[in-house]
Image: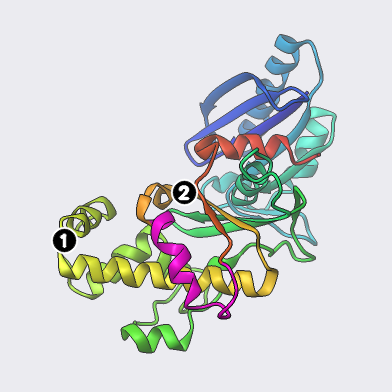
Amino acid sequence: MRYGFDIGGTKIEMAAFDDRLNQVFCQRVNTPTADYQQFLDCVKTLVAQADMTLHTRGSIGIGLPGVTDPISHKQLSVNVPCLSGHCLGDDLANTLDRPVTIENDCRCFALSEASTEQTRGHDIVFGVIIGTGAGGGLVLNRHLYKGKNGLAGEWGHTPISAQLVQRYDLPLFACSCGLSGCFERYVSGRGLMALSQHFHHQATSVPDLLTHYRQGCPLAQRLIAMYIDILASALASLQLMLDVDAFVFGGGLSNIAEIYQLLPQAMRGWLFAHSQPAAILPPVYGDSSGVRGAALLDG
């Protein structure tokens, strides 16, 4: 039996899956964010309840925002502050008396979506998260690839090209990662709204901007075309480097239907003349992919 945890700043979702990845058990609780020992006790209680209910001893994978230092194994988590500075994996393994695998939640999404019927036959799948931020994960033959420093998939913190800056007279937005001009600052929900404000559109939210776009507002249509071109540039760069078979989208902006219609053609402008854009796919499991992907971590 596989146990997956999707840990966020508000809730913890824990689910159990059988060998065929059918979900057989699920529970949700509020996330203890201020007290580390309380957090450990919370996870221990959830695991004990699952073990008792299912009469088994499941393997444990955990997906959560933030990063694990590859040398010290210490966690850095903005959403769950009490975890920062602690060796969460080691402490949970001792608390639960079994191995624990921890991974970034974006990579858990990618692993889940690369393990579906939709992506069967695609050897190289890239999970693209566009929501509050922009993250992702690279999956090769249904195995998550992380790299020596655990940075594989951090496409959101690569810089936009000078060609884009010149084409649209773009500002170089500073990024919270310490760099500037990162794709995340243009293609995330906050990035799209920053572009909207910079070019003086009256929209107050992404749905509001989309309403103007669909009603034929010239400025909104220009902004969405600009957004699609910037996103296409990022994905085309990944395809040129990795020859990706399929991009699977997640996050709030993955619900924009126009993305799947417009991106393939836009990507052609950033690829070699005879190259075919990778498949652009919607998520199969969506918000449930985090916990499902976490359960797959030990596989």
Residue 260 on the magenta segment: yes
| Residue at (40% x, 72% y) in the render | 229
Please identify the quarter of the rendering in which residue 194 is found: bottom left
Give the secondary structure at mark 1. loop
* Residue picked out by circle 1: 216
Q: Which residues are magenta?
A: 259-276
Where residue 15 sits: x, y (%)? 64, 25
Please identify the quarter of the rendering in which residue 298 is found: top right
| Residue at (65% x, 38% y) in the render | 117
Q: Sort mark 2 into few (<14), some (14-19) or many (20+) by Cα contacts within 10 Å.
A: many
| Residue at (81% x, 36% y) in the render | 93
Taking depth in this image into account, of 12 and 285 the one nearest to the observer is: 285
Where residue 196 sits: x, y (%)? 25, 68
Residue 157 visible to an observer of this rendering: no
State the CA–CA distance, disc 2 to disc 1: 26 Å
Taking depth in this image into account, of 31 and 158 the one nearest to the observer is: 158
Q: Earlier in the sequence, mark 2 or mark 1?
A: 1
Where residue 206 sits: x, y (%)? 28, 55
Please identify the quarter of the rendering in which residue 168 is found: bottom left
